[in-house]
Image: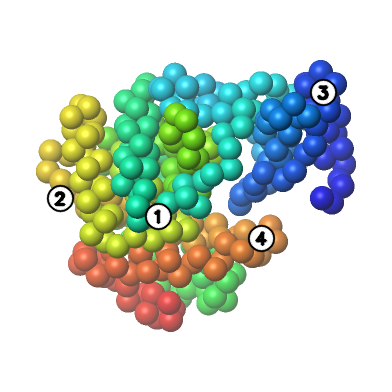
């Protein structure tokens, strides 16, 4: 492991938190943010996860607060055993290293997705006004604007013409209207297999610090139309129907007609996929993390399939043609 000043400070802080117990640190994971995670293994075999979040770039307070909301909802999230918010250090319970992304296969997908759906419904049912910031028009647009700014202009090096920008703006307006028309519930905002852990109780949920109050379909489409894993459309439809049926039974505010929910799900997915295309390009060009770009074809395929099914979105399909995507 490459030594650095923050790592040295983290090790000193952990020594205090663990009351002098001997431990070794190994990388646990990283993501597209500036946060880093390390697994602290003690001589007696116990393990913890240490988060390093540089305070000038990341704020640990939402992680702590939203983690508590998840626990109150009956969702398995890491416990905070120690914190230094000014330094950007957290000591967390260890949910293991078996991600849904690594473990999912044809034999276990049904059971694992059923667990993930049940946990999501518990999270949504816990919704209370005033707890989380709104997923409002400004945030929806800020996310989608990452697509022309980073993916098109920086990655493709094809700045949009005035006409193309107008087409994109019309699509953005449709997607925003669809999103804001949906009932608002707690939204994890990255509820996908990479952030779900196979553990007991299942699943463990990570990377929830950006949660908001927003469209009820958002976490559902994040789970079933994943950034790193693709499923056959029939399977996605089946899981989405199962979610919708359970949500109705739980008295969540899903539409009475599944066709209405499916349309909202698909349009919400397009908004998310535009955002992620921009984020992955930004991770490469700004943050020096090139590995995420290899998954952009998956998102372009998602986007193309949706534009073919809805006439109102067809102009975006033509724009992708013009950009040779």
Image spot of residue 301 (x, y percent): 37, 69
State the residue position of label 1. Answer: 105
For the image shown, how many numbered marks are present on the structure?
Answer: 4
Name which of mark 2 and mark 1 comes first in the sequence.
1
211 vs 84, left or right, is left
Estimate the spatial distance between the alpha carbons at disc 4 and disc 3, rounded to whole Å. Answer: 34 Å
145 vs 171, left or right, is right
Position above or below: 168 against 265? below
Estimate the spatial distance between the alpha carbons at disc 2 and disc 1, rounded to whole Å. Answer: 28 Å
Considering depth in this image, is 65 or 248 the residue closer to the camera? 248
Name which of mark 4 and mark 1 comes first in the sequence.
1
Label 1, residues with CA under 10 Å away: few <14, some 14-19, many ≥20? few
Of discs 3 and 2, which sits in the foreground? 3
Instruction: Tell me the quarter of the image containing the C terminus.
Output: bottom left
* Residue at x 47%, y 73% (from the top left corner): 160
The numbered mark at residue 145 is none
Question: In terms of image quadrants, where is residue 10?
Answer: top right
79 vs 259, left or right, is right
State the residue position of label 2. Answer: 259
* Label 3 SS: loop
Name which of mark 3 and mark 2 comes first in the sequence.
3
Position above or below: 123 against 116? above
* Label 2 SS: helix
State the residue position of label 4. Answer: 289
Label 4, residues with CA under 10 Å away: few <14, some 14-19, many ≥20? some
């Amino acid at each position: 492991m490459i030594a650095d000043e923050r790592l040295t400070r983290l090790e000193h802080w952990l020594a205090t938190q663990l009351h002098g117990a001997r431990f070794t640190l190994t990388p646990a994971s990283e993501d597209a943010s500036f946060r880093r995670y390390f697994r602290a293994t003690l001589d007696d075999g116990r393990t913890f996860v240490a988060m390093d979040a540089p305070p000038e770039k990341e704020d640990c307070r939402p992680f702590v607060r939203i983690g508590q909301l998840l626990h109150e909802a009956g969702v398995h999230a890491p416990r905070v055993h120690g914190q230094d918010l000014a330094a950007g250090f957290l000591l967390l319970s260890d949910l293991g290293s078996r991600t849904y992304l690594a473990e999912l296969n044809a034999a276990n997908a049904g059971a694992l997705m059923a667990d993930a759906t049940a946990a999501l419904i518990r999270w949504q049912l816990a919704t209370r006004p005033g707890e989380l910031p709104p997923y409002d028009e400004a945030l929806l647009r800020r996310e989608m604007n990452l697509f022309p700014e980073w993916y098109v202009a920086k990655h493709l090096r094809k700045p949009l013409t005035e006409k193309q920008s107008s087409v994109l703006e019309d699509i953005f307006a449709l997607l925003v209207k669809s999103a804001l028309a949906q009932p608002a519930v707690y939204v994890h905002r990255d509820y996908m297999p990479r952030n779900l852990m196979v553990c007991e109780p299942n699943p463990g949920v990570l990377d929830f610090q950006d949660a908001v109050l927003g469209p009820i379909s958002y976490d559902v489409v994040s789970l079933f139309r994943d950034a790193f894993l693709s499923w056959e459309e029939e399977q996605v439809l089946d899981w989405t129907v199962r979610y919708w049926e359970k949500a109705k039974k739980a008295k969540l505010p899903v539409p009475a007609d599944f066709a209405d929910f499916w349309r909202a799900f698909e349009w919400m997915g397009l908004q998310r996929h535009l955002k992620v295309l921009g984020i992955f390009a930004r991770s490469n060009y700004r943050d020096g993390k090139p590995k995420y770009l290899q998954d952009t074809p998956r998102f372009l395929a998602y986007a193309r399939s949706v534009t073919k099914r809805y006439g109102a979105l067809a102009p975006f399909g033509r724009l992708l043609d013009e950009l040779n995507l």
